[in-house]
Image: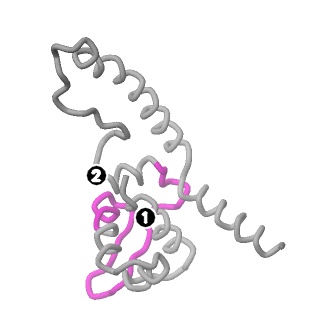
């Protein structure tokens, strides 16, 4: 898996908590990556209606309350897919071999169970949960 999902979490948290429109350059400084990569992630989020920008202005804002953005919705948006697929099966196993002939049917139900469970777990969590966790972690660090 690439980093678009975690970068999107970072960016949306920044947009939520900043209270202001933020540019791709400002977001890139926080993520410590280049602004062109941030713009790629922002395009994915904008295509799914999670953020908006106004023509002639260089900032982005959330279109939904953080509690309304599930982590599953965000994952699917950033990975440009309709379903989580963690495990890719190798191509062209030897069909003359009993293992090669049957391995896909043997492992697919196991893989699907794990992937569906992850989808269910991500659907139960929201951007608001990430933000809450961020504040808890930040508070713990200041107590040391």
Q: Secondary structure at mark 1?
A: helix
Residues in magenta?
A: 43-71
Sequence-first disc among 1 and 2: 1
Q: Residue at x 40, y 61 (%)?
A: 3
Q: Is residue 56 above or below residue 9?
A: below
Q: Residues within 10 Å of mark 1 (few under 14, many from 20)?
A: many
State the CA–CA distance, disc 1 to disc 2: 13 Å
Q: Position of residue 101 (x, y in %)?
A: 22, 15
Q: Is residue 30 magenta?
A: no
Residue 30 in picture, x, y percent from top left: 49, 80
Q: Is residue 69 left or right of residue 48?
A: right
State the residue at coordinates (36%, 22%). 107
Which of the labelled discs sits on residue 50, or is there none? none
Determine whether, in the image, residue 43 is placed left or right of residue 121. Answer: left
Assess whether residue 49 is covered by the magenta stretch: yes
Tell me where residue 103 appears, x and y as whole percent: 30, 20
Residue 80: image tag? 2
Q: Nearer the viewer, residue 13 or 97?
A: 97
Q: Which residue is mark 1?
A: 8
* Residue at the spot 43% in from the left edge and 64% down from the top edge: 8
């Amino acid at each position: 898996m690439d980093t678009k999902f975690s970068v999107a979490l970072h960016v949306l948290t920044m947009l939520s908590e900043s209270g202001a429109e933020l540019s791709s350059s400002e977001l890139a400084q926080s993520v410590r990556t280049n602004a062109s990569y941030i713009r790629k992630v922002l395009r994915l989020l904008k295509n799914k209606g999670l953020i908006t920008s106004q023509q002639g202005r260089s900032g982005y804002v959330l279109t939904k309350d953080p509690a309304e953005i599930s982590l599953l919705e965000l994952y699917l948006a950033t990975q440009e897919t309709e379903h989580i697929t963690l495990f890719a099966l190798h191509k062209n196993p030897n069909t003359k071999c009993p293992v090669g002939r049957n391995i896909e049917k043997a492992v697919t139900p196991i893989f699907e169970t794990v992937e569906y469970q992850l989808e269910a777990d991500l659907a139960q969590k929201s951007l608001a949960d990430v933000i809450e966790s961020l504040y808890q972690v930040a508070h713990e660090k200041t107590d040391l």
